[in-house]
Image (cartoon, rainbow, N blue to C red):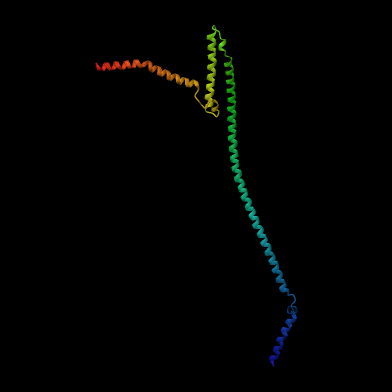
Amino acid sequence: MSTPSTRKQHLNIRTSQMEMHPQGSVGGSNPLADDFSGKLQEAQSQIEQLQQQQADVERQKLELQELNENKDDFLHGQVDLHEKLSTAVTTLDREIFATRQETEELEQARICFADHLEKINQLNPDGWNNESLRQDLARAISVLDLAEDEYEQTVSHFTSGRSASLFGGGNKPKRAAASESEFGSMLKNGFAFNLPIMILGVVALILYFIK
């Protein structure tokens, strides 16, 4: 008798449960499932946003890295070019100063040479008379000596500079060469003059030792 009563109660419980959730059994919307689905979509949307943010951060990181590399290249190029330009400016300043100074000296030399050339052109040996020949000749020789002295001094001054090629590339002045030649001639002449005396002296010594 007790068995049917228990079975009936069991059936009543299941019926009441079906009555409490009629829509779930029929196939309607489930609030729990809808809430879970909404949260899942929200989480997925947040994940997508985070992924997008991460991609933006990586992109910005690469852009910043590229900018830093370009900045480093710029700084190295700036320092290198600054050194080159600074050295070039200093070198050019020295060169310009030396060139200007040498140009001024060349201008002074030209004025000096032109003055001596004018004085030499004014000399006219054909117009000298016998009465003043000694004075005219002495004056003319003095003019030539002074011009030659200043010419040789100028050549010697520019020989070690960049304008050496303008005066024959550093050749010895004629007067110095003439002096060396004159000294050699004097030495040869003196040796030739004293040679007979030296021979006689040697012969005398030989005769002295033979006796």
Residue at the far front: name it.
126
Image position of 118 (left or right of 11): left
Question: Looking at the picture, how far across and down is residue 189, in whole percent?
Answer: 40, 17
78 or 7: nearer the eye?
78
The N terminus sits in image quarter: bottom right
Answer with the quarter of the image where residue 51 lies: bottom right
1 or 128: nearer the eye?
128
188 or 163: nearer the eye?
188
Residue at the far bottom: name it.
1
Image position of 199 (left or right of 146): left
Answer with the quarter of the image where residue 125 lies: top right
Residue shown at the point (60%, 38%) measured from the top left: 86
Residue shown at the point (70%, 67%) measured from the top left: 42
Total count of labels: 0
Residue at the far top: name it.
131
Q: Is residue 117 above or below residue 100?
A: above
The C terminus sits in image quarter: top left
Image position of 29 (left or right of 192): right
Question: Looking at the picture, how far across and down is residue 155, in whole percent?
Answer: 53, 24
Residue shown at the point (30%, 16%) measured from the top left: 203
Question: Looking at the picture, how far across and down is residue 188, in whole percent?
Answer: 40, 19
Answer with the quarter of the image where residue 2 lies: bottom right
Image position of 2 (left or right of 201): right
Residue shown at the point (61%, 50%) measured from the top left: 69
Q: Is residue 30 above or below residue 177?
A: below
